Amino acid sequence: MLLNSVILILREVLEAATLISVLLVLSLHLRGGVRWFWWSLPVGVVGTVLLAFNLDIITDALDGAGQEVANAALQTLVYCFTVGIVWLSVGIENGRAQIRTLTIFMALAVACAMIREGSETMVYITGFSAVAEHRTAVYAGGAIGAGIGLSLGVLMFSALRALDAKLARAACLVLLGLIGSGMVMQSTMLLEQVDWLPAGPALWGSSGFINEQSIAGQLLYAVFGYESSPSGIQVALYIASVLITAAAYLVARGRKGPVHVD
Amino acid sequence: MIKRAFLLLCSLMFLAIPAVAKTPVIELEILDHLFHPEEVRIPANTKVKLVVYNRDSTPEEFESYELNREKVIMGGRKANIFIGPLAPGVYPFFGEFNPKTAQGRVIVE
C-alpha cells in the first residue's frame, strides 16, 4: 500500500510539475514573474475538489461517458492554452502582445492540468484514508510521492534556468508543444474508451523497447504522452497537434511590423 | 463506369450498416479488490463493451497499458469501458489502487 501510494501520487504530481516548471521558466524569461502561479493554485484546488467529490455523478452523465469527456475537455483546454502561450511568447518579443494575457493563459493551463491530475489523486487519498488500516500508508506514501515529484520538477526548473537565455526559451517552447500534444493524445484515448471516437488497431507495440510502467516510460508519458501501443487516430491527432503548435509559432514570428495598440 | 462502380460500392456500404451486429457486452465485478472473473475471452477484431461493477466501498481504477485504458470507478458504482477491435493475444489489466491483488486479463482469440 505504501509503495503503491508513492508511485500513484508521484505519477500525477510529475505530470503537473513538468508543465509548471516549463511555464515558470518561460515566464521568467519574458519578465512575466511567478505571481500568476500563486493564482492558479486556489483555482486548481477548488476545481479538483469539485471534480473529485462529484465524480460518481459525472461518471454516469452522458450515458456513462461523463468522466472521460470531462477529463478530455480539460486536457484539450490545456493544449489550447499551450498553443496560445507559444503564440503570445513570440508576440511579446515582437512587442505585439501583452504579458498580462500570457500570464492569464499560463495560470489557466496550470489550473486545468491540476484539476485533471489532482482529482484522481484526491479520489484515491480520500477513498483509502477512510480505511483505518491503510491511512498511515496512504498519507506517508502520498507525501513521499509528492516530494519526489516536486523535486523532479525543481530539478527540471533548475536545469532549464541554467541554460543560456535563447536556448532556454527555445527548449521551453518545444517542451510546451510536446506536453500539449501529449494531452491531445491522452484525450483521444479517453474518447476512444467511451466510443466517442472510433478505436482502431494499435499502430505499433514498443512496450518491449520502452515499457510504459518503467521510470523512463513514465517520464516520457509525462512529457510526450508516450503510449507503447497507440491507435492510428491517436498518432494522427498527436502529429496534427504538434504541427498546429509549430504553425502558431511560425505565423506569430512572421507577424512583424509596427506595434499594435489595443 | 468507374462512377457507377463507386455508387454501387457506396450503396452496398449503406446496406451493410444495419447488418453490423450490436457491440457485445461483458460484465465484470470488483469484490474485495479482486476482479471476477479474472479472465475475459473476446473475439479478435471486435469492439466489446466492458461493464465493470465495483462492489467494494473503496474506489478503484481500471487500468491497462496494453489496452490503453484507465478509468476511476467509485465505490458501489459501475463503469463502461469500450475495448477493441484487437489483434489476438493476452492483454493484462489491473486495479491501479490495489495492483497487488486486482489483476486480470483479456484474452483475444
Image: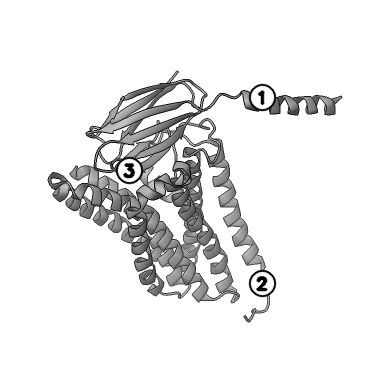
Is the image coloured rainbow, by chain, by secondary structure, or in one colour? one colour
Q: Which mark is residue A256?
A: 2
Q: Which mark is residue B16?
A: 1
Which chain is mark 2 on? Answer: A
For the C terminus of chain B, which image quadrant? top left
Q: Nearer the viewer, mark 3 or mark 1?
A: 1
| Front position in the image: A238 or B91 | B91
Cα gap from disc 2 to disc 1, whole angstroms: 55 Å
Which chain is mark 3 on? Answer: A
Disc 1 marks a residue whose amino acid type is Ala
Is residue A164 in view? no
Residue ID for mark 3: A215
Q: Where residue B89 appears, x then y in whole percent?
A: 43, 22
| Front position in the image: A168 or A249 | A249
For the N terminus of chain B, which image quadrant? top right
Cα gap from disc 3 to disc 1, whole angstroms: 46 Å
